[in-house]
Image (spheres, rainbow, N blue to C red):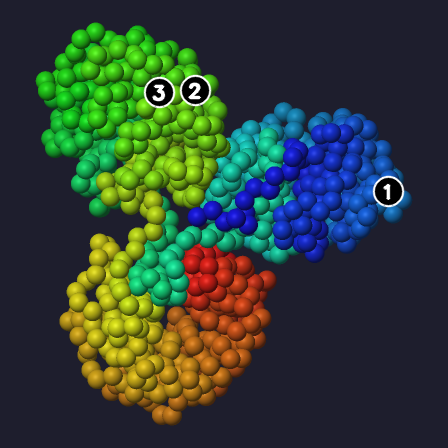
Amino acid sequence: MINPSTAPIPLGMTPDGVAVSPDGLRLYVSGPVDTGTVLVLDTATHTVAHRTVCSGATDMALSPDGGRLYVIDRETDSVSVVATDSMTVTGSIPTGFAPAKLAMTPNGTRLYVTIQPGGVAVIDTASNQVIRTVQVGEEPFAAVVTADGGRVYVTDRLSEGLVHVIATETDTVVGTPIEVGRMPLAVVVTPDGRRAFVVNHDDATVSVIDTAAGTVIATVEVGSFPRHAVISPEGSRLYVGNEMGGVSVLDTQTLTLVTTLPLDSGAGTMALTPDGHRAYAADFGGMSVLPFDTRTVTVPAGKRPEEAAITPDGQQIFVTDAADGTVTVVQTRPLRITAGRTPSAVAVTPDGAHAFVLDDGHGVAVVDTVEGKVTDTIDVEGAHVMALSHDGRRLYVGAPQTLSSIDTATRQVTGTVPVQDPGGVTVSPDGARLYVTDMATETVLVIDTDPLRLLGEPIAVGQSPQDLTVTPDGRHLYTGNVLSHDVSVIDTVDRTVTATIQIGSRPGFLTVSPDGRRVCVSSAEAANLTVIDTATQSVNGEPIPVLQVPQGLAFSADGSRLYVAAVHSRAVHVFDTVTRARIETIPAGLAPTALALSPDGRRAYVTGPTAGAVSVTDTNTTRVRIGGQPLGVAVTPDGRRAYVADAATGTVHAIDTATLQLAGPPVPVGGSPRYVAPSPDGGRLYVTDPATDSVAVIDTVTGTEARAPIPVGGSPAGLAVSPDGRRVYVAGSGAGTLSIVDTTTGTVIGAPVPAGVAPLDVALTPDGSRLFVTDTGADAVLVIDTGAPTDVRSISLPGAPHGVAISSDGRNLLVTVPARKALVVVDTTTLTTTGIPIPAGSGPHGLALAPEGRRAYVTNAASNTVSVVDW
């Protein structure tokens, strides 16, 4: 699903600098073309509100109050001063030769400008004059001022890369230069000033500097050709924009790569909104601005997603769809399987039980897809290309001078034929023929598979033939010729070339649609896909842009979708084959070049030569049909079952989390079950039923009721089981109470405890000492001491809460607030909200937290999505 709010914003010019106003309402975009322009965009509508001519406009900096915009003018070696209320240029400040980047002090009194050769001009913003020039290094480029205004860090692009430090009190260089990576193009400092992060363009790394010691303490790999970076307001996340590879997100404490956010194009200069929830990147080499959400990614999830539960390993999310009678199962992250040193191709058997991964130059790794591990390796010296027979019984591997046939059962070579330099291999639909490109002779060889032998003369094609594909009827073969920039069409009966189709760039991978009507050709060089009409043997329509280097591709079984591995996006792009529009981007977890789909189309296997692994990811969400109106959902502690309350049929369903099939018949529990919660040992399941004002108890082993329903009254809703399993806490949403159930006797202990106006959902701390209850009638979360349950405190929220969950360490409480379309984080020690509410979708209701890290999954009932939130 592509979020329209993060679609590229067309500008009609090439952007250079970007800046966001302090109130977050305006986005300023500069560009040096057409004598220089500064655009003002409305961040709500993403439309251009104003256009100002500003000579040679490149980098920009805003005054702290947003009243003045300073813009580098490379045409006149100066800085232009723009009044933002009228968007008029009010002055020009000569700086010295070739100004590059700007850095403003937090109080707005000084502006530092890197100039050449080896200088930083210091501008007094009151007089708009350069008051001194500091000699810094040989080729200073980027600069940043610390939050306390005491230091300026300046990158030096000369030689291997250095960072210099200027003390702002004296405007002198202090300490010794700090060695970083090659071509440092950006530097940012954490709000506390303890660490500086330097973006090294040529090394594809970020150097981490301990500012007190003045030394590099770590180097972190990011995407290809990083250009810029911004840091979140609280300093926990660093966003690194790459020319190729989207935006790398780093945890500034652990110094690890958290995730990679795919973009439609390369990222240049970036700017964050004041709340840090959205960023804007200049389209490097393009003519747009690329917005992206920094903490929230949205995925489709049915028609009315209500509640969510996560497996203990954090691999799967189960989401109830109240409007469609289904449970949506979402894979949270790709499964990464180590497979060889330089994997370059992958194929999956017809039964889906095994995948074969070509380890370029070495052989083939055999992956058990059920166990998720390599179970065998087949040594083939120099292995370079590979194809699997349609029945999965034979594997054909090409190496210099030889093509080998391998029995997939015995893993033994059963035959060989001479091929000088195989560039690609494919199998005819009936399995009787192999077609192999020979790059040395620029021909296609036809090989009989039983026995393995050459048939007839080689067929001459274009220059440097590599990948090839055959139509489903076996009548035509399409061969991509890399150096002649064309595709040869071969009649497989006559064994002659019947057409040569120019595509205008180097063809990469080829695939044919299931109906045989289209052949798609990827071109990394042109960053696009060419579609060939097999009836006319001509290019159909304009090429489809696929930035970030398209590689391997595959059609879905029905031909409605095309999956494209994009190496620098570290993702698989999904295209609608009718509209040709990109409809989804699936993170791959690695830089993919090769792609294969499982027989049922549910999983994509991707790999690439730099990965050393194969990544297995869901191609779309899986839906388990329940019927009725599924609402509450919970996963057992062992992760083997997900239990779903069906309010329409008065039953509870069990789902096998491994097979994603219903496990046994539904268990009748009463009128309209709402929430479910398992006991710590998984032996019991507790189910609230507001229709009968009771809690049902299910024996999960027998799949039957373990005892008669327990009356609790008050229209029971959310519930939680104590860590020792001896108590169940039940919110009575109709009566404003909390009932405490003794699980041994199956009775309510004492009188219900007053709990606000309309308590809905509940969450217990890991030690069971405190209970948090959302009160939908009072814009608050209630805090109850389980040892003294009448002691009720309240945490104010910016709206009525719905769902609640607590982090595994018990330090943070997360609450959905539908009216704000947001997720609120509460510190459980201080009992106060932290930070600004994090955007989710429309009508956020349920949520589930990953067992590790800081990731939440929020169901958005009104927008039919699940938000994946980095909180």
In the rendered image of this protein, does residue 604 appear above or below residue 440? Answer: below
Q: Residue furthest right?
A: 127
Which class describes the residues within 10 Å of circle 1: few (<14), some (14-19), or many (20+)?
Answer: few
User: Vertical placement of 531 versus 708: above or below?
Assistant: above
The reply, left or right, for residue 232 in relation to residue 846 is right
The furthest residue to the front: 536
Q: Secondary structure at mark 1?
A: strand
Q: Which residue is mark 1?
A: 90
x then y, percent, for residue 214? 64, 42
Q: Secondary structure at mark 3?
A: loop
* Residue 42 visible in image: yes
Name the residue: 39% across, 35% down.
564
The residue nearer to you, when weighing 420 against 491, is: 491
Amino acid type indicated by mark 3: Gln
Residue corresponding to mark 2: 503
257 horizontally vs 113: left or right: left
Q: Quadrant of residue 474?
A: top left
The residue at 42%/66% (across/down) is 846
Q: Residue at 27% of width from left, 32% of height from top?
A: 515
The quarter of the displayed image where residue 562 is located? top left
